[in-house]
Amino acid sequence: MGRIDHHEKICTLQTYLLGQGPSDRVIDRSVRKIINGVAVASKMISREVSRIGLSDLTGETGTINVQGEMVQRLDIYSEKVISEAMERTSSLCCMVSEESAEILTFPDASRKGEYVLLFDPLDGSSNIDVNISTGTIFSIQRRVTKQGVGSLEDCLQKGSSQVAAGYVLYGASTMLILTLGKGVAGFTLDISIGEFILTHPEIKIGHAPTKAYSVNEANYSGWSDNQKLLIRTIKGLENGEAYCTTSRYVGSLVADFHRTLFKGGFFAYPADGKNPNGKVRLLYEAAPVAMICEQAGGRASTGEESILNVVPESLHCRVPVYLGSRSLVDLTDKVLKS
Ligand code: FBP
């Protein structure tokens, strides 16, 4: 009898959301439609990312977005395919995208939608044309207003009320990491059948012996004394005891967080002279990643409070980010408050 092929026991994203996988929890129909919609759009983005250099989606559009960043063609393509997939779900009252200054709504569908999607269509886009990993990050909130098209009130909710959060990593393989508030699961895209297959049913933050710290040290001169003390302490320069024995920095939040999730360690984007509130956006970058991190047994802090407790001030507001293994984020809070 031949080797049993793993795929004969496959659990796809759809079957997982229908409670036919390891968890028998059936997810709300609208949330299922939204997550499946993001999954379909991310397959299209994955195809285009893997064809960079071959397609006319390479390079910049020549326009600057609300963040003051040069917009890449793939940023716009990614926002478009996600928006079109979401319109077909009729489950959203509105959306917030990193690439759009204002709230996005659909003329007809928005009225019926019970949820809000907040997303970064292509994170790390400055790495696209050098073929380094990028990603799509998403957060789903239940609307708070009663009816009609969604409003600012529906968007500016704390991370602690997220119904679901996830990201898709466009790396050596394309992976979707998802939490629905009860643990974290990972799915790998099998391009031979075009399905996200459950490959990591229960992700817990890693405990690799050689933990990496991940921060852009080029910003060091703009850090406060306590922030400098924190990084020196982690590197063992303060008392000779290194908490992390190596450093890694890709410059794509999704890629740097994914490694931290699977191997343990520490990722930070502190506030600094250039970025007084840090660089990472709260609603569609920090909050979803923080929910995944904490659901996997890690911690996510601004240095003052849990990222999930921060009250958003505006659609594109930023927060300082310190996340990863509990012990390292506990150390962060202790040093930064000292
Ligand atoms: P976008 O690419 O979505 O704008 O995200 C910003 C980002 O690229 C993060 O992914 C990453 O963590 C950070 O900026 C890197 O910033 P820097 O180049 O300043 O280190």
Image (spheres, rainbow, N blue to C red):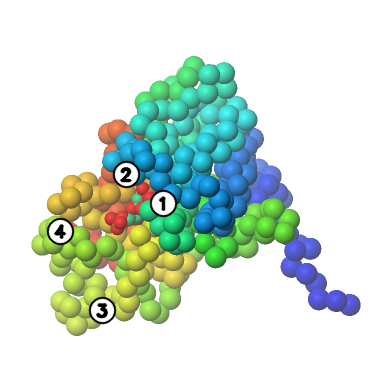
Decide if ligand 1 comes within 8 Å of the CB at mark 3. no
Q: Residue under circle 4?
A: 223
Residue 125, which numbered label? 1
Alpha carbon of mark 1 to alpha carbon of mark 2: how far? 10 Å
Badge 3: few (under 14), some or many (20 or more) residues near its Cα, within 10 Å? some
Q: Residue 239's image quarter?
A: bottom left
In the image, residue 332 sits, relative to residue 96, either above or below, namely below
Mark 2 or mark 4, which has the lower sequence index?
2
> Foreground mark, 3 or 2?
2
**Mark found first going from the N terminus, 1 or 3:** 1
Q: Nearer the viewer, mark 1 or mark 4?
A: 1
Q: Amino acid at mark 4?
A: Trp
Q: Nearer the viewer, residue 155 or 99?
A: 99
Q: Is the CB atom of the residue marked by disc 1 within 8 angstroms of ligand 1's nearest atom?
A: yes
**SS at mark 2?**
loop
**Mark 2 or mark 1, which is nearer the start of the sequence?**
2
